Amino acid sequence: MNGLNYDGFDNIHLIGIEGLEKSLITKLLERAAFFNSQKRNKKNEILKDYLVINLFFENSTRTKASFEIAAKSMSADILNIPVSTSSIKKGETLIDTASTLNAMHPDFLILRHPNSGAAEMLSKHVQCSIINAGDGRHEHPTQALLDAAVIKEKKGKLEGLKIAICGDILNSRVARSNIHLLITMGAIVNVIAPPTLMPVGIEKMGVNVFHDLNLGLKSADIIMILRLQNERMIGSETPSKREYYDLFGINEENIRLANKDVFIMHPGPMNRGVEIDSLLADNNERSLISAQVEMGVSVRMACLEMLKLSRDKIYK
Ligand code: NCD
C-alpha cells in the first residue's frame, strides 16, 4: 500500500461511474488486477477494525457475496442485514433504517435498492461511506469496474475496442454504468435492443444505437448480454421469450458477425434460452462469465481500499 493514493478522488462514497476521471478508473483497474493476481491466498489487514454492513433490498447472489468476501479478505468485520426479517418489513423508511445502522458506527454501508437515486440520497444522511451496489435503473458502479477489469485482462486495453451491449438497456443500471465507463476510457459502444427497451435519447451518452442485432454485432470485440429485467418493466415492453430469443438472443451462430476472437459477457443472473443460448454460455473459449465473478471480489477490494483512504484523511 506504500505510496498508494487515488489523487483527484476526495469523495467518501461511490455512487456511480458518471463523473469519475479516466485516471482514477485506470488506477482502480490496476489495483483490482493486483488483488486478482493474489487469488485470495493472501489475506491482508487493510480493513482491520473497520465495519462493513451489507444492506440489500433486492435479491443478489454475486454482488452481495463478493462484497462479503472482499471485506473478509481485507480483515474487516461484516454484517449482513436480512431485510426480509428486519424492521423494514414493519414499515421503517430507508433513512430511518440507515440512521439506525449509522448509529452503530459502521465504516461502509453497501446498499442495493430498487429506487434510482437511493444511494445518493442516503449518502447525505450518514457518516459512513455508501457504496452503491445497484439503485433501480440508475447505476451499478462496481459491476462496470469489474467488467472493465476483465476486458483489460483479456484484451490488454479498453481504448479503441468495440463493445456491443445487447438486451434490456432501458431497465439496466449495468448498461448505464458500463456506458459511462467505456466511453470515458475511449471504447466504441454499440447498444442493441428493441425500440421498447431502448432509453429515449441514449445516443447523447456517445453510443451507437441499433435495433437490428446483426448490424450491432458487426466487428464487435466484446458482446455484453443483459437479462430482461421483468421486475422493472411497466407494461408489455417485450414480445414472448421465444420471439425475443429469435430476434435478440445471442448464440454461436450470430456471434460470427463479430470479430473472430470475440468474447461474451453477462453480469448474471442469466436466463438461458432467452437472452443467451445455453451452449454459448458454457463455451469456455468465448465466455468470460466466470472471470467476471472472480474479478468481482478484486474490484470490490479496490473500491473499499480507495474509500478507506479517503475516510482516513477525514476521520483518522
Ligand atoms: C445485475 C443487477 O442486479 O443489476 N446483476 C448483478 O449485479 N450481477 C443485473 C441483473 O440483475 O440482471
Image: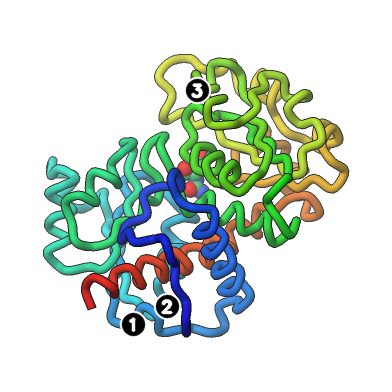
Residue 259 percent location from the top left of the image: 84, 41
Task: Identify the residue at horizontal 17%, vertical 60% (top origin).
Answer: 101
| SS under mark 3 | loop
Task: Identify the residue at horizontal 55%, vertical 29% (top origin).
Answer: 168
Mark on residue 74? Answer: 2
Residue type for callout 3: Pro
Residue 275 percent location from the top left of the image: 65, 32
Mark on residue 83? Answer: none
Foreground tag (2 vs 3) = 3
Q: For mark 1, does the 10 Å Cα neighbourhood hold few (<14), some (14 to 19), or many (20 or more) residues?
A: some
In terms of depth relative to the viewer, which is nearer, 198 or 17?
17
State the image quarter where residue 134 is shown: top left
Residue linked to disc 3: 199
Q: For mark 2, does the 10 Å Cα neighbourhood hold few (<14), some (14 to 19), or many (20 or more) residues?
A: many
Marks 1 and 2, the one that precedes in the sequence: 1
Residue linked to disc 1: 48
| SS under mark 1 | loop
Label 3 near ligand 1 (CB < 8 Å): no
Cα–Cα span, label 2 and label 3:
39 Å
Cα–Cα span, label 3 and label 1:
43 Å
Q: For mark 3, does the 10 Å Cα neighbourhood hold few (<14), some (14 to 19), or many (20 or more) residues?
A: some
Residue 67 percent location from the top left of the image: 42, 63
